[in-house]
Amino acid sequence: MRADLADRERAIAAAFDASEQVEVSTDRAELIESYDGVRKMIWRKVELYRQSRGTTTQVGGVQVIGDGAQITIVERIENSQIGSIGSGAQGGVSGQLLSNDATNGNVQEEATMNDETETDETGEATKEEGGIKPLPESLVQDLTTHRTLALRLALGEHPDMALIALTHALAEKTFYDFPRASVLEIQANSAHLRSFAQGINETAPARALAERHIYWTERRPKSSKDLWDFVVSLDADERMKLLAHCAALSLNAIKTPRMDRPSSLETSDKLAEAISLDMATHWTPTAESYFGRVTKAHILEAVTEAVGEDAANRIVDMKKQAMAQEAERLIAGTGWLPALLRGPEQPIQAEPEDEAYPMAAE
């Protein structure tokens, strides 16, 4: 139980700590809505209190009591010092401000939100702003749900805007650490390839991909709030290139013993065929990358396919390491690829051997 309370205290404190990094009031509102549960409730109450007092708050301490939380707030109002805000199980909030008065010494001023607070149809506390009570949260939820439905219908009828929204969503998740500005709930995961193939980050394709990513990283705005306008400002060709880059980073056609997804791998084959992928321009079989990691039977099969049966017969009695090195030399420049890397229209035909080809050492 004590550990659970400590976790809740840290969660609430983290909410306030995050708030101190926000400079614009609209960001505070966005931050509030990004939280869930107790953190969101406490944040809302404190923000209402902060706005009513015209103050800037900092967390002095947090203590969870029962279903609520007792929070010590440090306020900055001229000579003000310390106030405290408590939240109970029903969401009631009260605050007390202790201030220094130059002429009368320490004077206690009550600043209680409950006096100005009513409850909506859900029992949630609401505070009147300018004499007009905010809409009940349940009604806001209902209205925005209807608007979401209308937007879904309309967006499906505007492919050009759907493309912009999709590009915006993928770009935000690709280039920003804490994306929350996109209206599309689309995930863009990107597997770290270095976890699956040693040394892959040092290859030419990896360097080319990194350069392309740097190009867009340097062009995109620093704040995700400005990303929509940036995407809209791109011409159609650039926008498609940005979309293609972001989509490409989420591609995963890795086959591992623990990943059973044959349908996904079949799709990768269709994609490779559609874009005419030629792995011979991206990968070369060597003793290190392939021949030293397969059986002698695989090596002989590769040499037979790429060069011919006679060449394979000449290395058949070699030790494994020597055979792998000789296979690398024999196959170099032939364009041979293992079956896993070939496209459906890329059968490997053995090339006629040069009569002057040197005999492999026995």
Image (tube, rainbow, N blue to C red):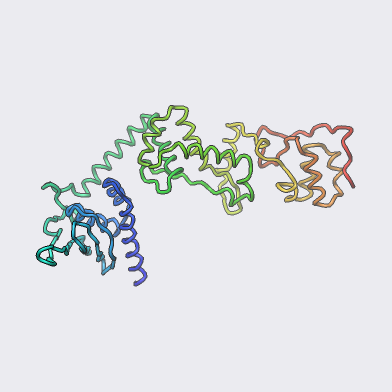
Q: Residue extending furthest bottom? A: 2
| Residue at screen point 48% across, 39% down | 246
In front of the other: 274 or 3: 3
Q: Is residue 203 left or right of residue 38?
A: right
| Residue at screen point 47% across, 34% down | 242
Whether residue 249 appears in this view of the structure is yes
In the rendered image of this protein, does residue 72 appear above or below residue 159?
below
Residue 29: image location, x then y, percent: 27, 48
In the rendered image of this protein, does residue 191 appear above or below residue 66?
above
The image quadrant that residue 78 belongs to is: bottom left
Q: Is residue 4 left or right of residue 67?
A: right
Q: Count the marks.
A: 0
| Residue at screen point 50% across, 37% down | 215
Residue 351: image location, x then y, percent: 80, 32
In front of the other: 236 or 136: 236
Instruction: State the quadrant of the N terminus.
Output: bottom left
Whether residue 126 appears in this view of the structure is no
Residue 295: image location, x then y, percent: 76, 50
Q: Is residue 236 left or right of residue 43?
A: right
The image quadrant that residue 77 belongs to is: bottom left
